[in-house]
Image (tube, rainbow, N blue to C red):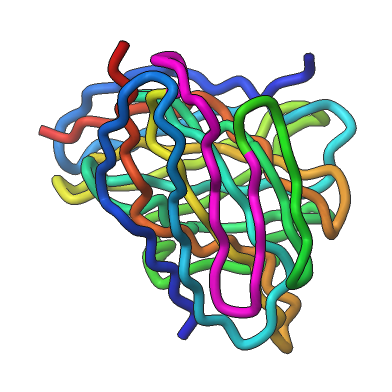
């Protein structure tokens, strides 16, 4: 069964360092997303990406965040200068059609020290 | 603002003891209500999408229903492997064509053998 894959599964970094989280969405999907979940809290929307551009972003997704689809298979989330409050599980998701459901990856746990 | 409230926060059942989880929502216009299952440290796993009041969907021991204000996830004769957190999310109409899902905090279900 096709699935969304994410790397790394866990990353520990120092405050102020840059982090790149990588995702390989399901191959024929057209819509891509990043969500995050701080421990014990709700899953929160960060950004959606379609047709090689950001289609929507939340208030959380400030100038420290960026997304990129560098080739036909990868979708990345970059945090330029990490803060303690960026510690969370980051989920990549993809969707095939406009009205379809999102399929999530297993997540990348980011710990900022 | 779109909101999703799930109850109860936690539910303990004996194996075989049927019950229901509730998801109440407030949205400007519903474009889909989604149920996901989340195991500890994992990404949300898609279960169901419901689009209109009166719609029902079933999968094994799970059945999801939808009214204009809430959705229920009925669990019939649960087994220990059904233990997980069940997440409800909504996608709403918006002028900008929002694609984001708004999640509830989830119901943590524990099924004892």
Give above or below for A8 relative to B46. Answer: above
> Is A100 left or right of B2, judged from the image as shown?
right
Q: Position of residue A110 (x, y in %)?
A: 29, 31
Q: Position of residue B40 (x, y in %)?
A: 33, 24
Q: Position of residue A8 (x, y in %)?
A: 43, 18
> Is A63 left or right of A41, judged from the image as shown?
right
The one of A1 and A47 positioned closer to us in this rendering: A1
Q: Give the residue furthest to the top.
A: B113
Q: How many marks?
A: 0
Give above or below for A58 relative to A86. Answer: below
Write the residue at 66% across / 64% down: B66
Write the residue at 57% across / 62% down: B71
Q: For residue B39, which quarter of the picture?
A: top left
Q: Tell whether position B66 is magenta.
A: yes
The one of A11 and B108 positioned closer to us in this rendering: B108
Write the residue at 73% across / 39% down: B58
Q: Give the residue furthest to the left.
A: A113
Give above or below for A38 relative to B62. Answer: below
Q: Tell whether position B6 is magenta.
A: no
Write the residue at 84% across / 45% down: A30
The one of B79 and B45 positioned closer to us in this rendering: B79
Give above or below for B63 relative to A71. Answer: below
> Is A95 left or right of B92, judged from the image as shown?
right
Magenta span covers which residues?
B63-82
> Is B46 left or right of B24, judged from the image as shown?
right
Q: Position of residue B112 (x, y in %)?
A: 28, 17
Q: Quadrant of the C terminus of chain B?
A: top left
């Amino acid at each position: 069964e096709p699935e969304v894959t994410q790397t790394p599964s866990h990353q520990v970094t120092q405050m102020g360092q840059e982090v790149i989280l990588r995702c390989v969405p399901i191959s024929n999907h057209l819509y891509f997303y990043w969500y995050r979940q701080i421990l014990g809290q709700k899953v929160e929307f960060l950004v959606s990406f379609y047709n090689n551009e950001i289609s929507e972003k939340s208030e959380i997704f400030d100038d420290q965040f960026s997304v990129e689809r560098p080739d036909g298979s990868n979708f990345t989330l970059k945090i330029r200068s990490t803060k303690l409050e960026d510690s969370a599980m980051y989920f990549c998701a993809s969707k095939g059609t406009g009205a379809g459901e999102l399929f999530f990856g297993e997540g990348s746990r980011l710990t900022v020290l | 603002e779109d909101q999703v409230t799930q109850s109860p926060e936690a539910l303990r059942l004996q194996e075989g003891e049927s019950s229901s989880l509730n998801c109440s929502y407030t949205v400007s216009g519903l474009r889909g209500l989604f149920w996901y299952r989340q195991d500890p440290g994992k990404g949300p796993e898609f279960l169901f999408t419901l689009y209109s009041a009166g719609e029902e969907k079933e999968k094994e021991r799970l059945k999801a229903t939808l009214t204009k204000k809430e959705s229920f996830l009925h669990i019939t004769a649960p087994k220990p492997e059904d233990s997980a957190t069940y997440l409800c999310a909504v996608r709403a109409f918006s002028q900008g064509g929002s694609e984001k899902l708004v999640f509830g905090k989830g119901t943590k279900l524990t099924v004892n053998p």
